[in-house]
Amino acid sequence: PRNTKRLIMNDIAIILDKVTKERDMYLKRGLELANHPHNSTPVAEVFEAFAAAQGEFPAITKGKQGYGYKYAELSSVLGIIIPILSKHGLHFTQYMTRDNILHTRIGHKSGQFFESQYKIPMPTPEQFASENKKTSYMQELGSRRTYVRRYEALAILGLNPEGEDSDAR
């Protein structure tokens, strides 16, 4: 019984430690996001121009063949959308911060903007090595960034490429 109590107490300590670390991570993330606003104040001009641009967006098709699925390539989507945004005084920007947060921003010539932010989960080199992947570590990082850039672009632009949504398999 005494050993059982020790084991239970040890398990509880491990769980509490994990919960505390997760809580601290979410609190830190909240502070990070507070330092990076999601939109300007005010936003009337950027939203008005964006609404006009969205009315001109064509249907996006999935033209790139993946491993058993099709998807809309980021360069194709932006090649179609950026001229429409520009026509309405808007620009599209994506940039990464050192903590692997991807910022996807729609900005207006007035200086107003709105953006989304997504923290890209990146494996450590040790985690990557243990997964026995057939790509290099740098290829894996690049692949993750490109994948998230594509989905964040589609999300902020309000686009849903035609066809079955199965490319995340």
Image (cartoon, helix red, strand yellow):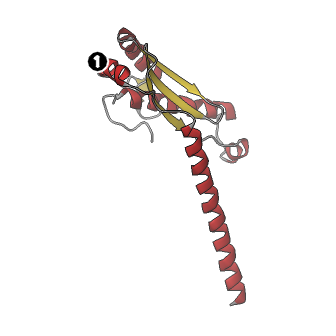
Q: Is residue 120 in sight in this rendering?
A: no
Front residue of this view, candidates 150 and 17: 17
98 w.r.t. 108: above or below? below
The residue furthest left is 55
Front residue of this view, candidates 144 and 27: 27
**Is 100 left, or right, of 59 in this rendering?**
right
Residue 64, horizontal then vertical, whole percent: 43, 24
Front residue of this view, candidates 135 and 20: 20
Q: Which residue is mark 1?
A: 52
Q: Secondary structure at mark 1?
A: helix
Q: Determine the image quadrant of residue 77.
A: top left
**Is 38 left, or right, of 53 in this rendering?**
right
Q: Quadrant of the C terminus?
A: top left
Task: Name the residue: 58% across, 50% down.
Answer: 27
Front residue of this view, candidates 39 and 124: 39
Number of numbered discs on residues: 1
Label 1 neighbourhood size at 10 Å, few (<14), some (14-19), many (20+)? some
Residue 138, horizontal then vertical, whole percent: 67, 31
The residue furthest front is 42
The residue furthest bottom is 1
Q: Determine the image quadrant of residue 43.
A: top left
Q: Is residue 166 in sight in this rendering?
A: yes
Task: Name the residue: 52% across, 24% down.
Answer: 94
Q: Quadrant of the N terminus?
A: bottom right
**Is 142 left, or right, of 43 in this rendering?**
right
Q: Determine the image quadrant of residue 153.
A: top left
Residue 21, horizontal then vertical, whole percent: 64, 57
Residue 124, horizontal then vertical, whole percent: 69, 43
Please, what is the three-letter code of the amino acid marked with disc 1?
Ala
